[in-house]
Image: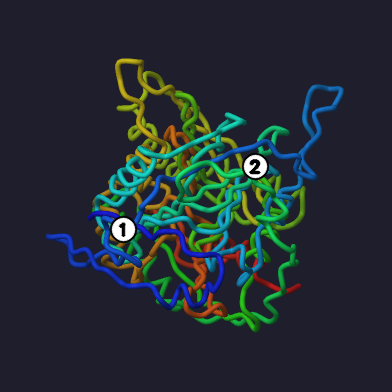
Amino acid sequence: MGPSCQPERARHDVAGRRARRVAWTIAHAGLPWSVMSTLTSAPAERLPHPLVVRTVALDLAGAPSSDATDGTLPEADPTDLLDLLPAPGAETADGAAPLAWVRRGDGLVGWGEVLRFEVGGPGRFADAERAWHELLAHAVVRDEVQVPGTGPVAFGSFAFDERSAAGGVVVVPRVVVGRRGGRAWLTTMTVGAALGPVPDLDELAGVRVPPASPGAVTYTDGAVTADGWRDVVAAGIAAVRDGEVDKVVLARDVEARTEHPLDARWALQRLAHGYPSCWTFSVDGMLGATPELLVRSEKGLVTSRVLAGTIRRTGDDAADLARAAILAHSSKDLEEHEYAVRSVAHALEPFCSSTNVPDVPFVLHLPNVLHLASDVTGVLGGEAHAHPSSLALAAALHPTAAVCGTPTQAAATLIRRIEGMDRARYAGPVGWFGADGDGEWGIALRSAQTSPDNPHRVRLFAGCGIVAASDPAAELAESEAKLVPMRTAISSD
């Protein structure tokens, strides 16, 4: 299914601009749905000028200093970047949702929207990458910083299931601010005939307005009730014991309604503060803090952080150390983790000249849970082999056993049959990539989807790996623990 794109609009009259959009449907034979485009002109006229990109160094207040005497850099406050995001409805936001990929103070934030590619179906990843390359073919780029994340950058979010109407989206922002290892930069992207003057951050960011509290939050069951989800898990356990699958990952959703419209920046700042070791993300209304890095590709090196096997923390340090030891020796959790690591290593193998898979996992300590974790690394094939982009690697890895199951196709079929909901972009790839294809893609976990039609409505997600030794009540408790980050992020206390 081919992508659609949406050109840049005037920065004024955001509401009127949105209202004047013309829907244009591209049908794709053999698929039960179409991709909806939002265009103001015919396809041949949608990009009359090339993409113009300029990156300049930035003296970002709060960036880590390089003056440390021990050779290390102090950790930056992750909200320094998130603080730059404009408020909902601000003229500088162009009416678009904020964009973010931040961890331990480094990363990228973006706002405004030059254009977007909306894709769907089995070819959604390839279609998105093709559209990105076509856009870059005639781009005018001046990059004065030259580090990963500078120059042309796009953010993306993709549905878990190829059959989901949520499809996928790649957003090219108007403004990107990045930071890495003590260096900061500002990138502007627009459609024009030539480079403009040196961009000014204060002008592009506009007046800084603190995020507003969402007020009281009420929760209701999602597609399946809590009691009903126990039955879903029981059906999954039965399928494992019957030999239909070795492992299946089952998810549930919860509906939240906020007293006041949710300002995504409120949630993002709380997630970044509370979960600094996770990747805090926001793309097209999908936001969260994922502990699981699907793939990072940088200069021929690839990394994937695999999580599978979880136990809830107690809040008592001594008790949690004991729980960590229990988790590290749990046959049920080690079995679940082995399936996940094996699936990632197998998917990376065709692209790498060498890979390194740890013999045993480590225990990752998060504020709400403990996870078994493994960092799988690899070196992309030699010069005789074309290096795949980070998005192509994400497509090859998705879905991993950590979010789907083993064997993959059998688990995906089982999920469609018994889970009782459309995951949309939950548990799908989310992240960013640049002109050279390098980038970072996480799995959209510990996440929620905001509603473009109702700013009070938020859909929260959580999932659990099911093997033969699983227990429905324990899995429900684990899912509740995994909902804690987003519940806390959108709370007002």
The residue wearing badge 2 is: 198
Residue 242 left/right relative to 357 = left
Residue 211 left/right relative to 31 = right
At which x and y percent is residue 342?
Answer: 38, 35
At which x and y percent is residue 286?
Answer: 50, 62
Q: Please tell me the numbered disc located at residue 4.
A: 1
The figure's colour scheme reads rainbow
The tag earlier along the polypeptide, 2 or 1, is: 1
* Image quarter of residue 203: bottom right
At which x and y percent is residue 376?
Answer: 47, 31
SS for callout 1: strand
Is any part of residue 224 visible from this angle? no
At which x and y percent is residue 460?
Answer: 52, 68
Residue most extreme to the left: 30
Specify the amino acid type for callout 2. Answer: Val
Residue most extreme to the top: 383
Q: Is residue 195 above or below residue 11?
A: above
Total labels drawn: 2
